[in-house]
Image: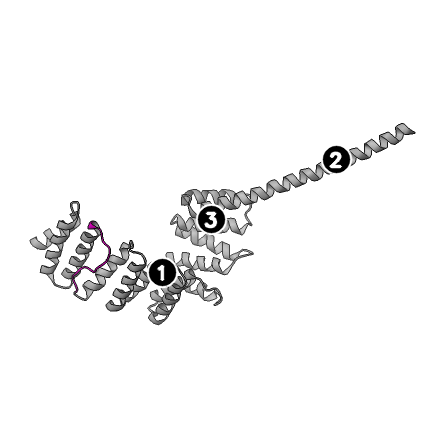
Amino acid sequence: MRQQFFLSASLAGALVLSACAEKADETVERAFQEVNVIDESNLNDVMMTVADPNEAVAHFQRTLKTGPDRIELQRGLAYSLIRAKRTTEGTTAWKKVVSMKGATSEDQVQLAGALVRSGEWDAAKGILDKVPPTHETYERYRLEAVVADANKDWKRADSFYEIATGLTTKPAKVMNNWGYSKLTRGDFTGAERLFGEAIRQNPGLFTAKNNLVLARGAQRNYTLPVIPLDQTERALLLHTLALSAVKQGDVKVGENLLREAIDTHPQHFEEASRSLAALENG
């Protein structure tokens, strides 16, 4: 009888230990799954932001084979295709994202951005019109401004550029875009002001410096503005001014500016040299 009791107690103990072991295994497995999710999430973030874009595309294409219904992977693929400048594929990928369960207003904005890159202005406007007015982001209003620009709806463009400028701590690029919009409309004074503001926000933004010189040249102001410039930038901007002068019939002014650009450049300035030779021999 005692032996039977001992065996029963031993069996019960073994069952308890077995159950504990199974629970421990489940806990460990669950912990590893959680770690894997965290690791994968971190890896996906890295792939979308700092990894080589084409490597990121390959990563998400590979990962999607095991989870085709996971919207975060499809989103990562779409982001990566756009970063890799594979716009047609990226647009298709964003269309798939917005059709999936869990799609957000920001996904629609990203699709609109891909359509803008493809030059599909009407389609981009159609998507932006579907974005709720409560979704107020810099990217949404930057795209709204660009689309309004393409449609020559200047009043709406100015309104959207102004809103976008207020929604970012780094407004230099959108100010430059707004200035270029003013430049194409012939509002040279307004363009000059916006390019100047863009340069104050980001003194290294050479595109804004070049655009500022174009705006001044269009007003027959052929002096360089007082802005931060290194020697190479100064030479390049003198060349831009020279071409503006020639375009407006001020050929002698243009020739003098080209000579100054050649003398200023720290290396041989081939493009300016060719332009000057063409004028002197023309």
Q: Which residue is mark 1?
A: 171
- Disc 2 marks which amino acid? Ser
Magenta stretch: residue 203 in it?
A: no
Q: Give the foreground label among 3 and 1.
A: 1
Magenta extent? 221-231
Furthest residue in direction top, as rendered: 3
- Disc 1 marks which amino acid? Pro
- Residue 138: percent from left, percent from top: 42, 61
- Residue 161: percent from left, percent from top: 36, 65
Left or right of 6, for residue 18? left
The quarter of the picture where the C terminus appears is bottom left
Foreground residue among 12 and 91: 12
Left or right of 190, for residue 92? right
Q: Give the foreground label among 3 and 2.
A: 2
Foreground residue among 211 and 203: 203
Q: Which residue is mark 2?
A: 18
- Residue 8: percent from left, percent from top: 85, 32
Mark toward the start of the polypeptide (3 vs 1):
3
Foreground residue among 140 and 260: 260
Foreground residue among 261 and 83: 261
- Residue 34: percent from left, percent from top: 59, 44
Q: Residue at x 15, y 52 (%)?
A: 261
Does the magenta stretch mainly form a helix, a strand or a loop? loop
Q: Which residue is mark 3?
A: 77
Query: How many residues crowd mark 1 within 10 Å: few (<14), some (14–19), many (20+)?
Result: some
Quadrant location of residue 191?
Answer: bottom left
How far apart are labels 3 and 1 at the CA level? 28 Å
How far apart are labels 1 and 2 at the CA level? 63 Å
The quarter of the picture where the N terminus appears is top right
Magenta stretch: residue 230 in it?
A: yes
The answer to whether the residue labelled 1 contacts the one labelled 2, judged by CB atoms less than 8 Å apart, is no
